[in-house]
Image: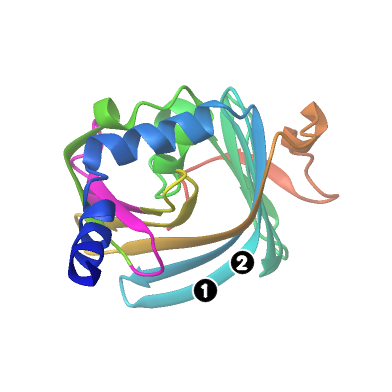
Amino acid sequence: MAALATAAAAQGPAALNARNLASRIDRHYNSLHSLSVHFVQHYDGMGAHRKEAGVLLLRKPGKMRWTYTDPDGQLFILDGRYAYFFTPGQSEAQRVPEKQLNDLRSPLQFLLGHTQLEKELTNLRATLAGNGGYDLSGVPKGMEQRVSELKIEAQADGTIRKMSIVGTDGVTNSFEFSGELGNVPAPDSAFVFTAPPGVHIVDGEPPV
């Protein structure tokens, strides 16, 4: 009996295949109109190694705000039309039309709409991860020239714990998420970029 129970336990997690896992992630995030979550971001590539952290605020449809505490004061805002990038100490803030956004944060935009991961990722596959989680991986449609793999580590209930984006140039951008809160207050003012005194907004390219 003990052997049968062990075998059943081993087979249980494996029964959550890629389609089922994608569906659970969809269901979890499609039930939210906003969320707040702490993030730690690791960038590795092009001779650079960076670790940054802060709080991500999302509101549907199409709005996000990355408020960085490390480095303190750095800001990325997507207001639904434009993305704004600002780093303290610089005299300019970059503005990029949302449709031209090719920054490696852009795969996270799937959380801002009506998520259908099975349709949005090709070569979809799922494997077991540590700590009772699952890895879902694939390639975002329309980003094949920039992204070779998007991997999502999620809990069985569909909550995302980690995400990594591997670029075709070998750059890896990964995020660890904690303290997720759903349906939090997300006023319009949170997604309006106001340039500090002496800072000019210029049209530019997303930073690496």
Q: How crowded is mark 2: few (under 14 residues within 10 Å), some or many (20 or more)?
A: many
Circle 2: residue type: Ala
Residue 161 x/y as whole percent:
48, 57
Quarter of the image where the N terminus is located: bottom left
Residue depicted at x 18% and y 70%: 3
Bounds of the magenta span? 130-152
Side (left or right) of 132 relative to 194: left
Residue depicted at x 50% and y 47%: 159
Residue 51 numbered mark, or none: 1
Identify the secondary structure beneath mark 2.
strand
- Distance, label 1 to label 2, CA atoms, is 7 Å
Magenta run includes residue 109: no
Report whether residue 170 is seen.
yes
Side (left or right) of 131 relative to 198: left
Residue 53 x/y as whole percent:
61, 66
Report whether residue 101 is seen.
no
Quarter of the image where the C terminus is located: bottom left
- Residue 2 picture quarter: bottom left
Mark 2, residue position: 53
Residue 114 x/y as whole percent:
46, 22
Are the residues at dot 1 and dot 2 in contact (C-beta closer than 8 Å)?
yes
Identify the secondary structure beneath mark 1.
strand
Residue 67 x/y as whole percent:
69, 54
Residue depicted at x 29% and y 36%: 20
